[in-house]
Image: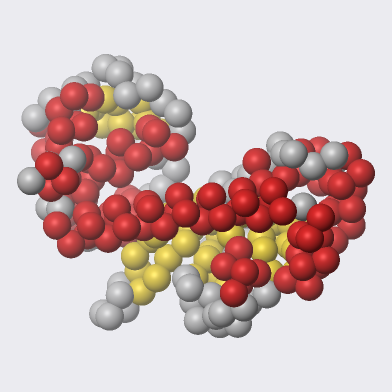
Amino acid sequence: MTNRTFLRDVTLFSDLSDSELRKLESFLEQRSFPKSQIIFHAHERGNSLFIIKRGRVKISMNDRNGREIILGILKAGDFFGEMALLDSEPRSATVSSLEPCQALVLSREQFLQFIPRHPEVVMKMLTTFSQRLRKADEKISRLVFADAYEKVASVLVEITEERKIPLNVGAEIVLSLSRKELADLVGLSRETLTRVIAAFQKAGLVRIDGRRIGIISPTRLKREATRSMSR
């Protein structure tokens, strides 16, 4: 797939014409990253936007004890690093590859050349930024108020929503994260995560088969995911 064809399917640039995509393509640098490579660290200076062409990355921060907290997982078609383009401040989080990745990189200088004629791109970027802030607020609320069971139920429901899997009886999630990564995503130890998933299986909410999680009781899983929000 050519970069131009790929960009046409990226929501951020979906309204651009072929000639505009050709211009944008000329600004981009393609970079590759092996699995587990840090693409940039939190607090370092940054001036580039990354558009994932292949693979997945995780966005993370360390808490005061040095423990990694995963803020989100991004896949092909998603972008990151936009805050540095908009405010020139240091990076707010660390981004690293979960698997071999390719990304198209747009520098701030090139971005500022391109944007004056394409304000719709900035609007889409701000919309995505707002959605991510909203999700971050929800995550912080769960970390503060939710217990382990609610945290795990919430992330399972989120995965079905992100992948557009109908949350019905028999729905199946194939985990792309290791148990350690999933534990970091919900802010639990791996041992606690394993105990909670086993408890869900025993209670008849889910069925576990390796990395596959089958949903047995979607209603109860949703109820478990929103307990603290309804208090």
User: What residue is shown at x 58% (from left), y 59% (from top)?
Assistant: 80
Task: Give the colouring mode of the picture.
Answer: secondary structure
Q: Nearer the viewer, residue 57 or 28?
A: 28
Residue 178 on image: x %, y %: 38, 50
User: What residue is shown at x 27% (from left), y 60% (from top)?
Assistant: 140
Quarter holding the N terminus is top right
User: What residue is shown at x 46% (from left), y 33% (from top)?
Assistant: 163
Q: Is residue 164 left or right of residue 169?
A: right
User: What residue is shown at x 30% (from left), y 36% (from top)?
Assistant: 157
In the image, residue 144 above or below residue 205: below
Residue 221 on image: x %, y %: 19, 31
In the image, residue 198 above or below residue 94: above
**Quadrant assignment, res 110:** bottom right
Q: Nearer the viewer, residue 178 or 134?
A: 134
Residue 26 on image: x %, y %: 89, 57
Residue 229 on image: x %, y %: 16, 46
Q: Nearer the viewer, residue 182 or 62?
A: 62
- Residue 194 visible, this orientation: no
In the image, residue 105 above or below residue 63: above
Q: How many marks?
A: 0
Q: Is residue 106 left or right of residue 39?
A: right
**Quadrant assignment, res 16:** top right
- Residue 179 visible, this orientation: yes
Q: Is residue 119 left or right of residue 58?
A: right
